[in-house]
Amino acid sequence: DVIGRNLGCRMVDRGTLHPDHGAETVTIGRTDVEDLDLCATSRERRFRLFASIECEGQLFMTPYDFILAVTTDEPKGKYTFEIILIIELNQMLAETPPVWKGSSKLFRNLKERGVISYTEYLFLLCILTKPHAGFRIAFNMFDTDGNEMVDKKEFLVLQEIFRKKNEKRETKGDEEKRAMLRLQLYGYHSPTNSVLKTDAEELVSRSYWDTLRRNTSQALFSDLAERADDITSLVTDTTLLVHFFGKKGKAELNFEDFYRFMDNLQTEVLEIEFLSYSNGMNTISEEDFAHILLRYTNVENTSVFLENVRYSIPEEKGITFDEFRSFFQFLNNLEDFAIALNMYNFASRSIGQDEFKRAVYVATGLKLSPHLVNTVFKIFDVDKDDQLSYKEFIGIMKDRLHRGFRGYKTVQKYPTFKSCLKKELHSR
């Protein structure tokens, strides 16, 4: 209702047909929705569950939807969306600030006044879990002519790369339903004859980040480069496109602005998670920190880890946001950390706090505070020997880093989190 009032649009259940749209409107019933889910990948399903806007058959997330999708345990239980016209979408995008006015509150300030496409959702997920060094790699991949600037056409190569990977990963099913799903996700019926010159089996096994990193250059010399104008004409303008390239799409994006946007995005998501537990204080409790770390993981019994914190740290000192942020910056460098530990010959062995701190610094250049490292050890030190199981810690943290997409499951829920999150978002 809040979203509907803000946009002046109709909130419609996907199993209903609003009379204002006439007989030409296609009705998607509950059975059809479930059938489409059976054809969808886990990321497609999650995007569709959180997307709240439909324009000309294509589904979009709002900035608020995206924040919910990456900071809450479960999607909303009901398929609902707002049907809006292109003119309404353009009015919404007119309020998008330019990239040089970006901040770590961009998504919170925009709330429902913006749209994010499916391929942009995948891109933002990639960046959310990558070290800052990866930002330069991403930017250089888009910068096809090497002029240190990225234009709209160069950026839209992303649209085709992710679309092609998605088609390689499609589950078998009714082709008509897959076509309907593609229309929802991309806004147009994608051609089947445009291919990246990459082995299909190899492409499926890669992450979206690896696909982007390894296939952008060859895509630029394939039919994608020749069809750049066609791709641009098919793609609906979104908040990110207007933010990066201006309302007319003629602006160019430099690396400094790109880096600032990505750094702000990581900071904003972490601020929202931190503030949802801090209750206005400058710190969160060590137990709340444990709650956040264990969300989106496959740990079956979180109570064991939470009890470790309660008994091992009886006097609460608290975790500051700087400590919180530095730990998640470390997680984004988890692969390099694992390599550093291998160099120390600690692979599959327990490690102490000094070795842990040294490996983090070698791999990331970050100096984690002694209290933060001690808290991490108390959370995961099940046998109370002040040693960390390397293999178990890496496995659990990889789940957390990927926010459940390595094998999404419902985790233990904390009733106050969603209400606190909504309060925090709507107070901005």
Image (tube, rainbow, N blue to C red):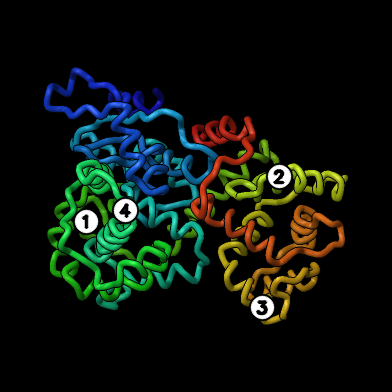
Within-10-Å neighbours for mark 1: few <14, some 14–19, many 20+: some
Q: Nearer the viewer, mark 4 or mark 1?
A: 4
Q: Nearer the viewer, mark 2 or mark 1?
A: 2
Label 4 belongs to which residue? 170
Q: Indicate the secondary structure of the residue bearing disc 2.
A: loop
- Residue 342, disc: 3
Q: Give yes or no for contact between labels 2 and 3 (Cβ–Cβ under 8 Å).
A: no
Within-10-Å neighbours for mark 3: few <14, some 14–19, many 20+: some
Label 2 belongs to which residue? 302
Within-10-Å neighbours for mark 2: few <14, some 14–19, many 20+: some
Query: In the rendered structure, which disc, 4 or 1, sits on the residue that comes first in sequence?
Result: 4
- Residue 249, disc: 1
The answer for how far apart the CA atoms under marks 3 and 1 are is 47 Å
The answer for how far apart the CA atoms under marks 4 and 2 are is 34 Å
> Where does residue 152 sit, x and y in percent of width and height?
24, 61
- Foreground: 237 or 78? 78
> Where does residue 377 sit, x and y in percent of width and height?
78, 59
> At 74% across and 64% down in the image, what residue appears?
389
